[in-house]
């Protein structure tokens, strides 16, 4: 719309333009970070990773560790791809530095 005002014998014209843009913003795809069971990585170390890298409580970490032990794998967390990849690399690195063969995978949700 337009409006006019008179100040000091001048006419000032201002025009306000609506610049609304329709954009389809999509949530990023999510990925599961999976811990894979093996016969060598200690359960305490898995709990350590779940509490330090994935920020789970001790109780939640124990539940996930039990799932890994009983079913062969467990979901450590669900994140956008870049974060899932970073947490998988960090977990694998810590496992290797501590002499454990723990495998970590990411899988699209």
Image (cartoon, helix red, strand yellow):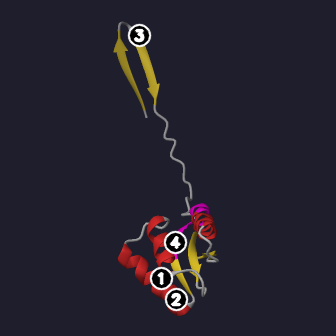
Q: Nearer the viewer, mark 2 or mark 4?
A: 2
Q: Secondary structure at mark 1?
A: helix
Residue at position x 54%, y 92% from top?
71
**Viewer can see residue 37:** yes
Residue corresponding to mark 3? 10
Check disc 1: other Cα within 10 Å, few if <14, some if 14-19, many if 20+.
many
Residue corresponding to mark 2? 69
Q: CA distance from mark 4 to mark 3?
A: 62 Å
Which label belongs to residue 78?
4
Residue corresponding to mark 1? 65
Whether residue 82 appears in magenta in the rendering, the answer is yes
Q: CA distance from mark 2 to mark 4?
A: 19 Å
Q: Give the mark nearer the N terminus: 2 vs 3.
A: 3
Residue 2 percent location from the top left of the image: 43, 30
State which region is magenta.
76-86
Residue 9 percent location from the top left of the image: 37, 7
Check disc 2: other Cα within 10 Å, few if <14, some if 14-19, many if 20+.
some
Q: CA distance from mark 2 to mark 3?
A: 81 Å
Residue 62 percent location from the top left of the image: 41, 81
Residue at position x 54%, y 48% from top?
21
Residue 43 lies, with reference to residue 1, above or below; the image says below
Are the residues at dot 1 and dot 4 in contact (C-beta closer than 8 Å)?
no
Q: Nearer the viewer, mark 1 or mark 3?
A: 1
């Amino acid at each position: 719309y337009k409006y006019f005002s008179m100040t000091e014998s001048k006419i000032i014209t201002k025009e306000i333009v609506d610049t609304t843009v329709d954009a389809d913003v999509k949530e990023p795809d999510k990925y599961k970070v999976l811990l894979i069971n093996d016969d060598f990585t200690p359960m305490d170390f898995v709990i350590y990773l779940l509490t330090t890298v994935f920020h789970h409580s001790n109780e939640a970490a124990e539940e996930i560790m039990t799932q890994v032990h009983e079913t062969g794998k467990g979901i450590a967390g669900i994140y956008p791809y870049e974060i899932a990849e970073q947490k998988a690399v960090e977990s694998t690195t810590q496992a290797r530095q501590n002499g454990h063969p723990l495998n970590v995978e990411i899988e699209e949700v």
